[in-house]
Image: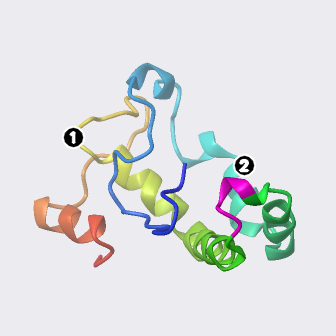
Amino acid sequence: MFPRRDWKFENIPLRGVFYRNDVYRGITGMESFEPWLTRLETMAAETVWAAASEIPPEWYGGDLSEMESLVEKLLARRSRIRELIECFGQSDRKPFPKWVGVEKKMGDEGWKDARWGLA
């Protein structure tokens, strides 16, 4: 799930999504992701750290600093979940046919900036 040693997260709208759009056909707006979206955004950092402590060390090579780095990045990125969902919805793939108002709001250059975290 996470490329070890890099813990690199690219802001690419199609990265990590299911390849078939039909799983997204019922999405009508950001509310379709509730209550889980808000739970992820507001989850106590201690809860994330506790979950990470349960991961077997052999899954991440036993390097505790690597796991700590991953958790810190995940905690920092959770504030961008809504933005990343919107970028996916605005992609040329058009995954959310029932979501009114998710149409592309940015030109090609804006999408490139969002991809690299410049937007």
Position of 20 with respect to 110 (left or right) is: right
Whether residue 72 sits left or right of residue 53 in the image: it is left
| Residue, disc 1 | 92
For the residues labelled 1 and 2, the Cα–Cα distance comes to 26 Å
What kind of residue is marked 1? Answer: Asp
The residue positioned farthest toward the left in the image shown:
108
Question: At x 79% / y 75%, what residue is drawn?
Answer: 45
Label 2 near label 1: C-beta < 8 Å? no
Residue named by callout 2: 36
Q: Which residues are magenta?
A: 58-62
- Quadrant of the image containing the C terminus: bottom left
Q: Decide which of 56, 76 is in the foreground and name it.
A: 56
The residue at 71%/59% (across/down) is: 40
Residue 12 at what x, y percent from top left?
32, 56
Badge 2 density bin: few <14, some 14–19, many ≥20, Cα 10 Å: few
The residue drawn where x is 48% and y is 29% is: 24
